[in-house]
Image (tube, grey):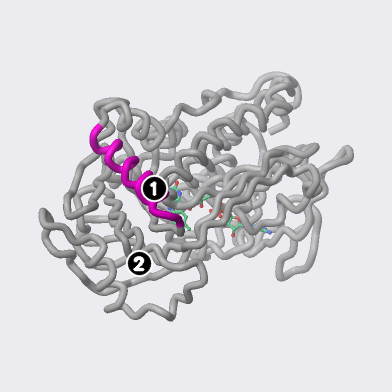
């Protein structure tokens, strides 16, 4: 069987919605549009194998799970995902468990992003709607009577025309560049640190995710299975992956997560390693003419708060609703308000991620900064009100718009 579901089929020349990128945002949006009878074409630069193996996020908020399940995309996630109520916090030799479930009634589900992407691709193939890998979008023309996407394959360059274009092409994609720089309203914060991540065949350090703020820097201990751990070390931003040997990584993880009330960290073969910069970015204009940005194309959060994948899904919920109203019912006001509807939830997640990042990492600062960091940690551990506030965002703020799964009726439906 070919690894390319399109089996070499040609990209159509026209569609209702052209979607750039087959990450969580593009694939989820394609499915939510399909459920409303709306045609889309998804163009993805990388191969299917690459997209399905790319290790990234792993914590899915309750509202994201609810959406995926309601859209018929959550069967395996519910079967294989691990439900967590909060996270562990270990500092000064003591381990604390912050249980958020009692305050919110919600859970987070641990399920690898690449597994979710596999499920989304399988669902897309079932719908028989076009999904083209190894197809790089080189330019987007968002205005005029017919917006268009220029793309390149081994067969050469061609154009796809569409009623609307959605750039779900990640932080380094082509979409944002199609919005004039002076219109984007960019907000940027770069942190002087990065995360060195490993996937290892070892028992996770704690039954749920654990943050260990330490004078050497943060270590994060998460999991992908009972014998598969995902762990991160705070390292300087200019670190090269080759700077660290496997024994050095384990030594440093062990030092940072050591505590009098805990058994020593179990080590094991490291099967994957990666380096992720820590940055916050917001494109305050998520729409320009007939081009819409979704997910990492519009915003980046540092991985500390586990929000990126979830924001990608919440954007698609808002956007699919707005596109459905416009295409199926001729109501365009939701599209016009896309940025205004989606951005407040993005900013709430930015605020949360920045708070976790500055509180948990050892960052440059004076003694006063350090004392404030410590006071925040103590407050999270000691105050129910503080845990309630933290947990509400960690487990997932409600989406701004309810998803639409209706059958198409009314103006503009051509599928
Ligand atoms: C180490 C790490 C840990 C993380 N942990 C978490 C976590 O626990 N929880 C969480 O919620 N988030 C987490 N994130 C963030 C999360 O992975 C991203 O926010 C998420 O992938 C965003 O999805 P997306 O679909 O918007 O973008 P992407 O997943 O980046 O998908 C974009 C797609 O577009 C394609 N593309 C790009 N340019 C073009 C082009 N020109 N033409 C065609 N296709 C193109 C790309 O190949 C890619 O497949 C983490 C990220 C990292 C790096």
Residue corresponding to mark 2: 198
Residue at x 27% of width, y 61% of height: 229
Q: Which residue is drawn at 29% across and 37% down?
A: 380
Q: Where is residue 311 in the image (x, y as percent from the top left)?
A: 51, 40
| Residue 75 image offset from top left, x and y in percent | 35, 40
Instruction: Out of 155 and 255, give the one closest to the viewer.
Output: 255
Residue 152 x %, y %:
74, 64
What residue lies at 53% left-to-right and 32% top-to-bottom?
Answer: 345
Front residue of this view, candidates 234 and 367 = 367
Q: Which disc number belongs to residue 359?
A: 1
In this view, the residue in front, 42 or 142, is 142
> Is 378 covered by the magenta stretch?
yes
Are the residues at dot 2 and dot 1 in contact (C-beta closer than 8 Å)?
A: no
* Part of the protein shown in magenta: 365-382
Q: Position of residue 400 (x, y in %)?
A: 54, 26
Residue 241 lies, with reference to residue 98, above or below; the image says below
> Looking at the rendered structure, which numbered label has been put on residue 329?
none
Q: What element carries label 1?
A: helix
Residue 215 visible at all: yes
Label 2 to label 1: alpha-carbon separation: 23 Å
In the depicted structure, whether residue 404 falls above or below residue 23: above
Extreme right residue here? 144
Q: Tell me if I can see residue 222 in this picture.
A: no
Above or below, 17 against 20 in this view is above
């Amino acid at each position: 069987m070919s690894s390319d579901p399109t089996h070499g089929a040609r990209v159509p020349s026209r569609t209702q919605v052209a979607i750039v990128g087959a990450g969580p945002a593009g694939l989820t949006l394609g499915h939510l549009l399909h459920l409303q009878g709306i045609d889309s074409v998804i163009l993805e630069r990388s191969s299917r194998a690459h997209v399905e193996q790319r290790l990234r996020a792993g914590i899915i908020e309750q509202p994201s799970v609810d959406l995926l399940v309601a859209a018929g995309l959550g069967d395996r996630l519910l079967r294989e995902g691990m439900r967590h109520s909060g996270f562990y916090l270990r500092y000064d030799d003591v381990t604390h468990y912050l249980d958020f479930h009692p305050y919110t009634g919600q859970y987070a589900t641990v399920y690898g992003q690449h597994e979710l992407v596999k499920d989304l691709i399988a669902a897309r193939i079932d719908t028989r709607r076009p999904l083209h890998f190894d197809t790089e979008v080189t330019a987007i023309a968002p205005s005029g009577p017919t917006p268009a996407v220029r793309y390149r394959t081994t067969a050469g360059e061609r154009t796809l025309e569409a009623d609307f274009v959605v750039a779900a092409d990640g932080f380094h994609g082509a979409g944002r560049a199609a919005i004039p720089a002076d219109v984007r309203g960019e907000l940027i914060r770069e942190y002087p640190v990065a995360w060195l991540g490993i996937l290892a065949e070892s028992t996770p350090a704690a039954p749920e995710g654990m943050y260990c703020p330490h004078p050497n820097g943060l270590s994060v201990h998460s999991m992908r299975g009972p014998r598969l751990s995902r762990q991160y070390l705070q390292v300087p931003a200019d670190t090269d992956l080759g700077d660290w040997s496997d024994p050095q990584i384990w030594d440093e993880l062990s030092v940072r997560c050591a505590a009098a009330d805990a058994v020593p960290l179990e080590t094991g073969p490291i099967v994957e390693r990666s380096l992720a910069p820590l940055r916050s970015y917001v494109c305050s204009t998520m729409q320009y003419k007939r081009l819409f940005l979704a997910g990492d194309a519009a915003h980046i959060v540092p991985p500390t708060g586990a929000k990126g994948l979830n924001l990608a899904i919440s954007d698609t919920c808002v956007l699919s609703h707005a596109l459905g109203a416009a295409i199926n019912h001729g109501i365009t006001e939701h599209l016009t308000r896309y940025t205004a509807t989606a951005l407040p939830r993005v900013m709430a997640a930015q605020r949360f991620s920045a708070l976790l990042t500055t509180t948990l990492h050892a960052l440059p600062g004076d003694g006063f900064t350090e004392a404030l960091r410590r006071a925040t940690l103590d407050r999270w551990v000691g105050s129910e009100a503080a845990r309630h506030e933290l947990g509400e965002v960690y487990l997932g703020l409600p989406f701004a718009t309810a998803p639409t799964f209706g059958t198409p009726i009314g103006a503009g439906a051509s599928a």
